[in-house]
Amino acid sequence: MRPLTGVLNVLQEECAEVIQAISKVQRFGMYDTYQGASNLERLAEEIGHVKCMIMELQALVPDLTDELIIKAIREKAMKLDYWLPHEGEVGYIPVGGKDEPRD
Ligand SMILES: [Mg+2]
């Protein structure tokens, strides 16, 4: 069995690599290439690494169920429906906004 600390450490690193891949997309575009791979391919790779580590974590923590994760996905999608239309209009929503939590 894999150690929980090691799985969490790698998941954390992979999340950071997704952030880096997103930065490259934002700076250079989805289809810009560097050393033979596009930013799209690198983003897909890092998202895959995160998904792999989430599966590893679920194998170690049975209480981290698909049902809990799917519930969170649905809730996040609903928040996006509310927040994303406002992104270009007002920039960042002020901290302490009273109606909806941001996460
Ligand atoms: Mg990676």
Image (spheres, rainbow, N blue to C red):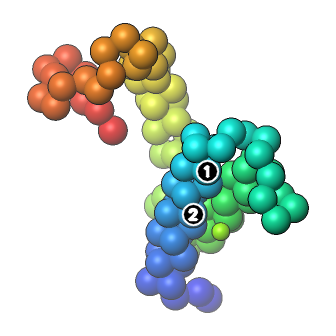
Label tally: 2
- Asked whether mark 1 lies closer than 8 Å to ligand 1, one says no
Residue 11, given in percent of the width and then of the height, sits at 53, 69
Between residue 40 and residue 58, name the one nearer to us: 40
Residues under labels 1 and 2: Cα distance?
Answer: 11 Å
Q: Which mark is residue 17?
A: 2
Q: Identity of the amino acid at label 1? A: Lys
Counting residues from the start of the chain, the first of labels 1 and 2 encountered is 2
Residue 70 visible in the snapshot: yes
Q: Residue at x 33, y 22 (%)?
A: 91
Q: The N terminus is located in which quarter? A: bottom right
In the image: residue 97, left or right of residue 13: left
Query: Is residue 94 shown above or below 82?
Result: below
- Marking on residue 101: none
> In the picture shown, does residue 65 fall above or below 35?
above
Height in image: 77 above or below 35? above
**Residue nearer the viewer, 36 or 72:** 36
Residue 41 in view (yes/no): no
- Image point (29%, 32%), residue name: 102
Front tag of 1 and 2:
1
Q: Name the residue nearer the viewer: 56 or 94.
A: 94
Left or right of 8 in this view: 21: right
Q: Vertical placement of 28 versus 78: above or below?
A: below
Disc 2 residue lies near ligand 1 with CB under 8 A: yes
Dot 2, how many residues are within 10 Å of its Cα: few (below 14), some (14-19), or many (20+)?
Answer: some
Q: Position of residue 73 (x, y in %)?
A: 52, 36
Q: Residue at x 37, y 11 (%)?
A: 89
Image point 61% across, 67% down: which residue? 53
Can you tell which mark lies on residue 24? 1
Q: Secondary structure at mark 2?
A: helix
Q: Position of residue 8 (x, y in %)?
A: 47, 74
